[in-house]
Image (cartoon, rainbow, N blue to C red):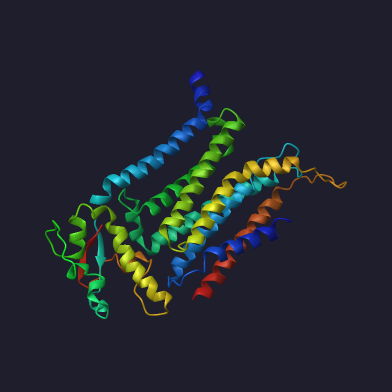
């Protein structure tokens, strides 16, 4: 009975501890797994981007980079470079989404902006360009 | 029904502040889902303004504000469920974000949704009596949970950058959330110091049905504004 009373009296403290634990778990879990995250299918229509300057995406054409990557694809290079892996998702979203958003704001035809399925899907008509995590 | 007009006006201003900036060609399902999310955030903010806690000397009797708070909370939970449900239905890829490596903005959104369901469940009378020794303890615990829901929701809105992307929108969103957190205490402090003017009127009894009516009206306003906004965008 005393234990029950103590638990009821401690309810606000337990709530605070629970909330801190929940958000700490989220942040710690994210930091620990962000570099090794899981695979999400990604399609990229290379031909549809033929009208744009190659170096917009292929920055290593002008300034060669040293990378431990075993494959010479955009995703592999970013994924296998330890410094880039944790920020890879943000970098790719910024590049693709940012460019599409700019075009949309200029009233021009543009690729997908926020709808996940437009890029992160298995499309039989477009060869997969890589697997993003 | 003195609350209907201010609530409808605040709701419209809230949507206008956060919605039309930036041209984004989203599908109808996404637009509906985003509007449900923004409506949910608005009703969450109203829960901070219209707390169910009576004043030391209440102007209105009965359970008007308590019933209003409870029904607004369920409306908020329903809109959150609709917001998450529609996005997951049209874009199941968002479920990838539930893994620890997912986008922080989405994970905080999921945490906010989880807490949004837990918080009103803990406030149910039977649960509340079993869990908390006194009303003050319940109030503190409920306030902490509510602030966690609001904080996580605002982080979700700002970090996902779907509609709140401009700097003034971000600061407005954060500012509104901070004011909302202080509102229950400030409002009570202020109202306790304002002299009560009854003008010979008697306190009205049995006002719970008015609260239910008000929530019904707000639900209709939210639904109709969703339709208007989606039609306007397409």
- Residue B188, given in percent of the width and then of the height, sits at 68, 41
Q: Nearer the viewer, residue B41 or B172?
A: B172
Work out which residue is located at the far left of the displayed protein and give it. Answer: A70
Q: Nearer the viewer, residue B70 or A10?
A: A10
B121 relative to B92 in the view: left or right: right
Determine the residue positioned at 55% across, 48% down: B178
Is residue B79 visible in this depiction of the protein?
no
| Quadrant (top left/top right/bottom left/bottom right) for the C terminus of chain A | bottom left
Residue B87 figure quarter: bottom left
Is residue B80 visible in this depiction of the protein?
yes
- Residue B62, given in percent of the width and then of the height, sits at 73, 42
Query: Does residue B113 lie above or below A110 as drawn?
Result: above
Work out which residue is located at the far front of the displayed protein and give it. Answer: A63
Determine the residue positioned at 56% across, 56% down: B42
- Residue B211, given in percent of the width and then of the height, sits at 68, 51
Work out which residue is located at the far right of the displayed protein and give it. Answer: B200
Query: Does residue A84 lie above or below B15 as drawn?
Result: above
- Residue B192, given in percent of the width and then of the height, sits at 73, 40
Residue B26 figure quarter: bottom left
Query: Does residue B215 lie above or below A55 as drawn?
Result: above
Determine the residue positioned at 82% across, 46% down: B197
B143 relative to A46 in the view: left or right: right
């Amino acid at each position: 009975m005393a234990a029950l009373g103590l638990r009821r009296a401690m309810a606000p403290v337990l709530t605070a501890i629970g909330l801190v634990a929940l958000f700490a778990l989220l942040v710690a879990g994210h930091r620990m797994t962000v570099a090794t995250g899981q695979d999400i299918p990604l399609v990229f229509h290379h031909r549809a981007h033929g009208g744009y300057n190659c170096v917009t995406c292929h920055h290593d054409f002008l300034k060669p980079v040293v990378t431990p990557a075993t494959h010479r694809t955009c995703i592999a290079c970013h994924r296998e470079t330890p410094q880039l892996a944790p920020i890879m998702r943000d970098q790719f979203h910024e590049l693709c989404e940012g460019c599409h958003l700019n075009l949309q704001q200029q009233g021009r035809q543009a690729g997908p902006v926020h709808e996940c399925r437009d890029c992160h899907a298995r499309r039989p008509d477009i060869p997969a360009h890589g697997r993003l995590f | 029904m003195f609350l209907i007009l201010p609530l409808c006006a605040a709701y419209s201003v809230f949507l206008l502040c956060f919605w039309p900036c930036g041209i984004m060609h989203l599908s109808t399902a996404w637009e509906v889902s985003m509007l449900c999310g923004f409506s949910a955030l608005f009703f969450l903010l109203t829960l901070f303004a219209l707390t169910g806690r009576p004043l030391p000397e209440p102007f209105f009797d009965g359970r008007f504000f308590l019933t209003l708070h409870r029904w607004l909370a369920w409306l908020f939970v329903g809109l959150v469920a609709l917001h998450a449900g529609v996005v997951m239905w049209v874009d199941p890829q968002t479920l990838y974000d539930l893994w620890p490596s997912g986008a922080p903005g989405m994970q905080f959104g999921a945490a906010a949704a989880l807490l949004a369901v837990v918080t009103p469940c803990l406030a149910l009378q039977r649960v509340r009596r079993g869990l908390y020794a006194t009303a003050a303890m319940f109030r503190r615990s409920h306030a902490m949970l509510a602030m966690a829901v609001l904080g996580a929701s605002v982080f979700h809105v700002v970090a996902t950058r779907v509609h709140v992307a401009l700097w003034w929108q971000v600061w407005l969103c954060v500012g509104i959330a901070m004011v909302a957190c202080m509102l229950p205490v400030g409002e009570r402090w202020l109202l306790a110091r304002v002299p009560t003017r009854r003008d010979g009127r008697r306190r009205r009894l049995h006002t719970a049905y008015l609260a239910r009516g008000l929530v019904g009206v707000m639900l209709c306003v939210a639904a109709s504004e969703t339709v208007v906004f989606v039609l306007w965008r397409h």
